């Protein structure tokens, strides 16, 4: 066995991770892949022919370089996969449940911040679903899932932007700030719980690390919606809600475009 370590400068989100996984899908000599998104490092355990792996990664144009390729001993730990899948299912359920909760309460309370945050939750749920659903699937099916999720997110985000513009130029009621704050606090608790669930796996596996990054980002986003709710109450204006909603819709579209890039390569 050999251990190859790649530095990939443009690998900073799970979309790039999935992009690389799809590219390496049909290379039979790869035994294991480990992604460190924080440090942008990819470790690959393989049997031979590093040039084939190196050229496949280089074709993605993610500023990659091979740091080392050395002999190693490797043994798989199947029980770890079970733990990781359970953790991913848990955070998937949490994210999808709060997508529904935030979407419903956002519409009722007239808060674009909650609606946008619900789409961010949905975007996370899509990525977790891709990680779980695609296990053992053929490349064509993985790409189909990615395309559907990417286009669906863009459609919802564009509809959200249209609604934001209408509210900017029209006369709209001030959002129900109490609902914004309460639901966002609950979402904050849910994302904190997701972090704890993932951390308990004590795994360095790519999907778990990616999920940790997502949940950490969601905690920050939840805090932003809470702050917007407080500002809506303080100023008695819907502008803070529209601003945070616009920012979150932009984040959703950025993530969706990365997913589409994944599906088209």
Image (cartoon, rainbow, N blue to C red):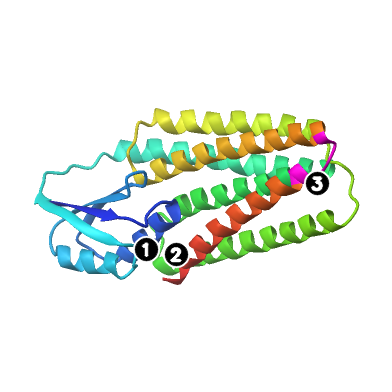
Q: Which residues are magenta?
A: 235-241
Element under label 3? helix
What is the spatial separation of the Cα atoms under label 2 and label 1, in whole angstroms? 8 Å
Question: In terms of depth relative to the viewer, which is nearer, 48 or 232?
Answer: 232
Q: Where does residue 137 sit, x and y in percent of width and height?
A: 41, 61
| In-front residue for pair 231/33 | 231
Q: Secondary structure at mark 1?
A: helix
**Mark 3 against mark 1, which lies toward the viewer?**
3
Residue under the point 75% across and 48% down: 242
Point out the image quarter for the C terminus. Answer: bottom left
- Drawn side of residue 141 relative to residue 52, left or right: right
Residue 107, disc: 3
> 263 or 222: nearer the eye?
222
Q: Pointer 1: residues within 10 angstroms few (<14), some, or many (20+)?
A: some
The reply to whether callout 3 and callout 1 are in contact (CB within 8 Å) is: no
Q: Residue 6's quadrant in the figure? A: bottom left
Estimate the x, y position of residue 57 in percent, counting from the top left: 28, 64
Q: Which residue is mark 2?
A: 262
Q: Is residue 1 visible?
A: no
Sooner in the amino-acid sequence: mark 2 or mark 3: 3
Q: Quadrant of residue 151?
A: bottom right
Magenta stretch: residue 262 in it? Answer: no
Q: Which residue is mark 1?
A: 22
Q: Indicate which disc, 2 or 1, sits on the residue closer to the N terminus.
A: 1
Q: CA distance from mark 2 to mark 3?
A: 32 Å
Q: Can see residue 86?
A: yes
Q: Are marks 2 and 1 in contact (CB under 8 Å)?
A: yes
């Amino acid at each position: 066995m050999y251990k190859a370590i790649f530095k990939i400068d443009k690998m900073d989100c799970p979309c790039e991770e999935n992009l690389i996984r799809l590219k390496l899908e049909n290379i039979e000599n790869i035994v294991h892949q480990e992604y460190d998104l924080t440090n942008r490092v990819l470790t690959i355990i393989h049997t031979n022919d590093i040039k084939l792996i190196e050229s496949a990664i280089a074709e993605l144009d993610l500023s990659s370089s091979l740091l080392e390729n050395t002999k190693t001993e490797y043994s798989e730990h199947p029980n770890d996969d079970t733990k990781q899948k359970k953790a991913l299912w848990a955070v998937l359920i949490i994210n999808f449940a709060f997508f529904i909760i935030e979407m419903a309460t956002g519409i009722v309370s007239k808060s674009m911040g909650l609606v946008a945050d619900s789409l961010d939750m949905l975007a996370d749920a899509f990525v977790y679903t891709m990680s779980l659903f695609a296990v053992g699937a053929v490349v064509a099916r993985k790409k189909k899932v990615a395309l559907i999720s990417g286009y669906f997110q863009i459609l919802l985000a564009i509809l959200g932007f249209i609604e934001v513009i209408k509210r900017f130029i029209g006369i709209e009621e001030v959002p129900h700030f109490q609902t914004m704050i309460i639901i966002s606090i609950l979402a904050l608790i849910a994302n904190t719980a997701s972090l704890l669930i993932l951390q308990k796996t004590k795994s360095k596996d790519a999907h778990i690390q990616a999920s940790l990054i997502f949940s950490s980002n969601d905690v920050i986003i939840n805090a932003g919606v809470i702050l917007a709710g407080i500002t809506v109450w303080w100023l008695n204006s819907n502008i803070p809600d529209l601003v945070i909603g616009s920012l979150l819709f932009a984040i959703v579209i950025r993530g969706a475009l990365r997913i589409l890039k994944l599906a088209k390569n």
